[in-house]
Amino acid sequence: NSNMKLIILILLSINIFALETTQPKDLLNSISKHAIRIGTGEVNSYYVFVDPMCPHSKKLIKLLSENMMKQIQSTFYVFLYRLPKFESDQLIHFIYQSQNPKSSLMDIMVANKQPDLSSYEINHDRIDMIDNIASVAKQLKMKKRPYIIHFENTSIFCTVSEGSAPCLEEFDF
């Protein structure tokens, strides 16, 4: 009976451990369908979190949009994730709800066009999507924008633009 309790305890601890060690790539793949994609290359994958009102995020998106060679080599999965100091919620909703989110992203972040936000209604499906993106970003402990996570080819190991991420660990048990 005590052996059975020990086995159950071990199995429970393995499941808890497995939950705590969710791979960053798995988290990112769970939201990749919501990404605004720039580029079609297969050499590198970049997961880029930006705030549409952040000047540094705007500069990065402008650079990505102009660098055709990078777009041929790599795919950039762009996610909108609000920085607390900016009131960008409406802008994020507007971009994600537009007919062409990539075009709206470029208009706002590269061409500096200001859309009329007074007449649109928020789609509640988009709220869930934005919440999913924010949840992943919080799990990956993102503080700054732009925040970039880079994977080479099919590797599960990555580099990040600031701070540390669990994917920097050499071994993953």
Image (cartoon, grey):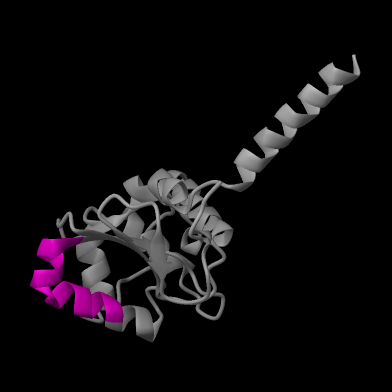
In-image side of 165 versus 58 (left or right):
right
Whether residue 73 is visible: yes
Q: Is residue 98 left or right of residue 42?
A: right
Tell me if I can see residue 118 in this picture: no
- Residue at 15 percent of width and 57 percent of height: 41
Residue 170 % position (x, y)? 48, 59
Q: Quadrant of the N terminus?
A: top right
> What type of secondary structure mainly makes up the magenta span?
helix
User: Magenta span covers which residues?
Assistant: 60-74
Quarter-wise, where is residue 42 in the image? Answer: bottom left
Mark count: 0
Q: Residue furthest right?
A: 2
Q: Position of residue 84 (x, y in %)?
A: 56, 75
Q: Position of residue 53 (x, y in %)?
A: 40, 79
* Residue at x 67%, y 35% (from the top left corner): 14
Front position in the image: 141 or 158: 158
Q: Is residue 12 above or below residue 113?
A: above
Residue 102 lies in the magenta-colored region = no
145 left or right, relative to 78: right
Q: Is residue 104 above or below residue 57?
A: above
Tell me what residue is drawn at x 62 percent, y 41 percent. 19
Splitting the image into 4 quarters, where does residue 98 fall?
bottom left
The x, y position of residue 154, in whole percent, is 29, 49
Q: Seen from this angle, which residue lies furthest top?
A: 1
Q: Does residue 63 show up magenta in the picture? A: yes
Residue positioned 29% across, 83% down in the render: 59
For the residue pair 88 and 48, the one nearer the viewer reads as: 48
Reply above or below: 132 against 164.
above
